[in-house]
Each structure stands twice: as C-alpha cells, then as structure tokens.
Image (cartoon, rainbow, N blue to C red):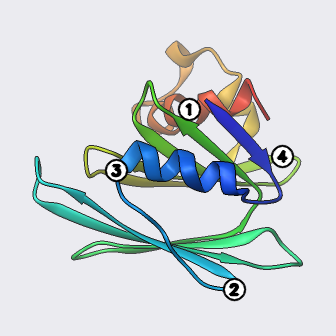
Amino acid sequence: MTLQKNKITEEDIIKIEKLFSEEFKKSDSSYSILIRSEKVNSNISVDLIQDENSGFLVSLYTNNTHLQLQSCSSIVVSEMLEEVIFISETEEMISGLIVSKQGDCALYSNVDKKVLRTDFSELNSEKLLSAIALSITESIT
C-alpha cells in the first residue's frame, strides 16, 4: 500500500498502471488512463490533472457517470484490495474517490473524520459504508 501527499509521483503512476494492467497517457500537466474490466464489461476513464495550488483534480467517466474529486492531496494504492483511493481532505472532513480493478467506482464526499474512528456497530448502514471504505486512509493519513 502506498500513500503520497500533495503530489503524484512517477512511482505512483507505475503502481496504478501495474494494478490495472493499463498505461497512462501523459501530457505536461495531466495523466489519463482507461481501465477495462471484461469481467463486468465496463470501462472507466480517469484523468488526473495537476493543479499547483490545490493538489490535483481527478475526473472519472463511465458509460453513465461522471465523478470529480477536487483538491486531491493523497493517493492510496492497495494491491490487496485491488483499488486506488484518491483522497481530498480538510482537518475535519475527508472525501475519497475509489476505483477498483473489478470495474467498480465509488465516491464518498465530505465524511466527518470522526466517523472513521467511531465504533462501526454504532453507525447506520449508510454511514457504515463510507466508514469502512475510507477507514484505510485513517491509519496512514
């Protein structure tokens, strides 16, 4: 598992390419990758656009969805979970855009960081989903 704060390194790009068995197309200020999952017949296009002032913008497209995470400051690449989590956070809130090798994607936005430290048995089902999905970030951010 890898975490990078406030930048994307070439090492991160290589780890993401390895995880998804795809290569990024690179330009001066952006990276683009098309992630194909034949298992569920899906394509996910991810654009990483660097912004000198606020981390970077992550834009994700599927056949029927467009998700965007602004001010992304960290990336978690988990080979065990077969996913990448793009993280944007403030002192009290965290947002995570998750892209899975299985062809899934999810966005959990403006989650109170206290939820990640709560006893999961005390959470309702909706908060439980975000807490579990983003809890991996709590141990390394």
In this rendering, would 82 be left or right of 70? left
Residue 69, position as x, y percentages in the image: 60, 68
Residue 35 seen in the figure: yes
Name the front one of labels 1 and 2: 2
Q: Which residue is mark 3?
A: 21
CA gap, disc 2 and disc 3: 23 Å
Tell which of 39 and 31 is nearer to you. Answer: 31
Q: Residue at x 42, y 29 (%)?
A: 81
Dot placed on the residue nearer the N-terminal end, 3 or 4: 3
Depicted 70 relative to depicted 132: above or below: below
Residue 78, position as x, y percentages in the image: 52, 33
CA gap, disc 3 and disc 1: 29 Å
CA gap, disc 1 and disc 2: 36 Å
Q: Residue at x 84, y 54 (%)?
A: 90
Q: Which residue is mark 2?
A: 28
Give residue 92's mark. Answer: 4
